[in-house]
Amino acid sequence: MTEHLFSYGTLQNQQTQLELFGRTLDGSPDILSGYKKATIEIKDEAFLAKGDEQYQQTLLPTKDKNDFIKGTVLELTNEELLLADKYEPENYKRIKVVLESGKEAWVYVAVDAS
């Protein structure tokens, strides 16, 4: 079964996809309304040990349709989605959203951001 994951950050990078999933993912541009970006500090040592930046973007819900995030909706398998879960910092969680295209997709947000 195909899952959709909305990426607004590093998972859009083909090199990251190759390293994590062993392939590049199919994807298309999309928009998530009612959210804005915020920068948070990552303290997850395992995440930082991979060479990722200490300060990362997360999404904050605003419920204001004038706030939106441009990104890519990626197509991946359930197994790949579980790999993405392991890739993200420990203080991120995956939530379901509806994109401007009408697609339902998962997106990662900081635990204290939603």
Image (tube, grey):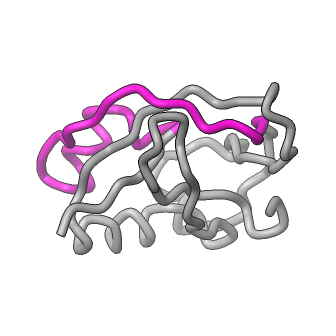
The image position of residue 3, as x and y in percent, is: 30, 61
Q: Is residue 53 above or below residue 44?
A: above
Q: Is residue 46 left or right of residue 11?
A: right
Residue ID at (53%, 42%): 99
Residue ID at (46%, 30%): 30
Residue ID at (76%, 36%): 37
Q: Is residue 12 magenta?
A: yes
Query: Magenta stretch?
Result: 8-37
Q: Is residue 105 left or right of residue 81?
A: right
Camera-side residue: 55 or 79? 79
Residue sitting at the far front: 102
Q: Quadrant of residue 93?
A: bottom right
Q: Is residue 25 magenta?
A: yes
Q: Is residue 22 above or below residue 70?
A: below
Q: Please identify the quadrant where the C terminus is shown.
A: bottom right
Residue sitting at the far left: 23
The image position of residue 88, as x and y in percent, is: 51, 61
The image position of residue 49, as x and y in percent, is: 51, 58
The image position of residue 65, as x and y in percent, is: 79, 33
Camera-side residue: 99 or 69? 99
Q: Is residue 11 left or right of residue 36?
A: left
